[in-house]
Structure formats: C-alpha cells, structure tokens
Amino acid sequence: GAVVSQHPSWVICKSGTSVKIECRSLDFQATTMFWYRQFPKQSLMLMATSNEGSKATYEQGVEKDKFLINHASLTLSTLTVTSAHPEDSSFYICSTGKPTPTLNTEAFFGQGTRLTVV
Amino acid sequence: AQSVTQPDIHITVSEGASLELRCNYSYGATPYLFWYVQSPGQGLQLLLKYFSGDTLVQGIKGFEAEFKRSQSSFNLRKPSVHWSDAAEYFCAVSYSGGYQKVTFGTGTKLQVIP
C-alpha cells in the first residue's frame, strides 16, 4: 500500500487565491519531507526541504513567501501556494524516506497534485 | 552540484524488443542511484535502486540496471518490452542519503509499438 499520501490529487483554483496541498507519511515518522515541482514535459525539480519543527529550506529561485511550507507534525507536511497565478500551474509531488543509520532507503513519493490556476 | 543526464528524450521500440535507457550522473563519492517510472498524470514508481554491492541490480517488472563507476553510468535495461511499459522513465541520484535531495534527469519517454 501507499507509504506517502498526498491530497488533493488535482485542484483548479482562480488566480489570486491560495491552495493548500497535504503530504502525509503513513508508515513512519518523517522528520524530513521534500517538495518537488514538475512542469509539463519537464523533469522534477526540488523546491524545498520540509523539516519538522523548524523552517523549511528552499532551493535557489524558489520564493519562500509564495510557497509556504509547514511541517507541524512528524507525519504531515503542507505546501500552500499563495496568491496563485497561471504560471504556478504544475504537478507538485512530495516525498520522504524512512530514516536509517546507513541512509540506505529510497524516497517514497506521494501521488502528486495537479494544480491548474485559471 | 549533482546532476543527471538522460541523453535520449524519446525512444520508440517494438513490443518484444530489448530496451536500454541511458543515464549518466555527475561524479560523486557515494551515489545513490535510482530509476523511476511515471505513467501519464501519475506519481512515481521505483523500478530499482543501487546503494552499494553488486553493480547489476534487478528491479520490478523485469528491469535491471548496471552501475559502472568508471563511466559514471547507470543504464536501465529490459530484454523484452511489453506495451504496458510505455511511460516516462527518470534516472535519479542522491548523495545526501537514499531519499534526501534527489536530483532527477530530464526523463526518457518510451513509446512501444505493436
């Protein structure tokens, strides 16, 4: 079964509104979760690292005030796209992994969220 | 910065034919290497991974990949392609740990013709 659950699967919103995407770790506590974005016909690009109980770390070029990340519990991280514009339309996907001493574990990805801003 | 190159954007093969998808990664001491598959509008499914040990790794759906450190490559292979294999394939690498800060290649779209 799914290890990471992402909700919603798709969302359409009006330009200027905000959208919240949830990412839940179902099988283990996730102190770190990752948010990626995939534009049409492109690869996935890491946007930010979500850290439980502390501020997220954003990759270069990603606006932290636009993409608000909250990781308030060990099983839930949320990404809020604020004041969304059509150029924010994309496929957003989260991931996490089960921490092990050797780091020998792969990332588990959510199902992704298709955001369309009209 | 870590990077992954997938030189083939689009590949077309006949059903039953063999397949090889190429992947090169930027040099790093201990790469964690992955191949993921993505069907249209879907999330990512892990096909296989390499962390250490045997350089030929077996994955799901009959896929395998070989890690060649000297060539910084991690090519994906399948001896006989099925129509259901049509999808987009992403090679990925991480140096921070298996699941942390994964860098993806640009993807190879596989088309399978009857």
Image: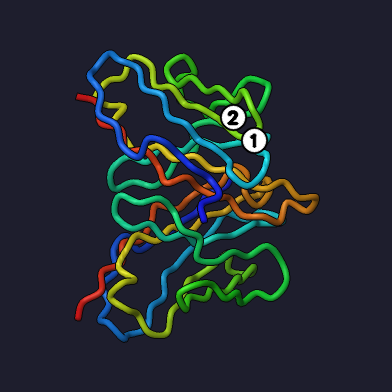
B42 left or right of B4 in image: left
Could one spot residue B31 in this view of the protein? yes
| Viewer-closest of B32 and A84 | A84
Which residue bears the numbered disc 2?
A50
The vertical placement of B3 against B48, above or below, is above
Chain ID at mark 2 = A
The vertical placement of A113 against A67, above or below, is below
- Relative image position of residue B111 (x, y in whole percent): 26, 69
Question: Which quadrant of the figure contains the N terminus of chain B?
Answer: top right
| Viewer-closest of B78 and A80 | A80
Other residues around mark 2 within 10 Å, as few (<14) / some (14–19) / many (≥20): many
Amino acid carrying label 1: it is Thr
Instruction: Look at the numbered discs 1 and 2 and tell me whether their residues touch, using CB distance below 8 Å.
Output: yes
- Relative image position of residue B11 (x, y in whole percent): 29, 69
A58 left or right of A13 in image: right
A3 left or right of A63 in image: right
Q: Residue at x 60, y 74 (%)?
A: B57
SS at circle 2: strand
Q: Residue at x 64, y 68 (%)?
A: B69
Amino acid carrying label 2: it is Ser
Which residue bears the numbered disc 1?
A32
Task: Give whichever of discs 1 and 2 has the lower sequence position.
Answer: 1
Chain ID at mark 1 = A
Q: CA distance from mark 1 to mark 2?
A: 6 Å
In the rendered image, the residue lying farthest to the right is A101
- Relative image position of residue A97 (x, y in whole percent): 63, 47
Q: Residue at x 31, y 27 (%)?
A: A88
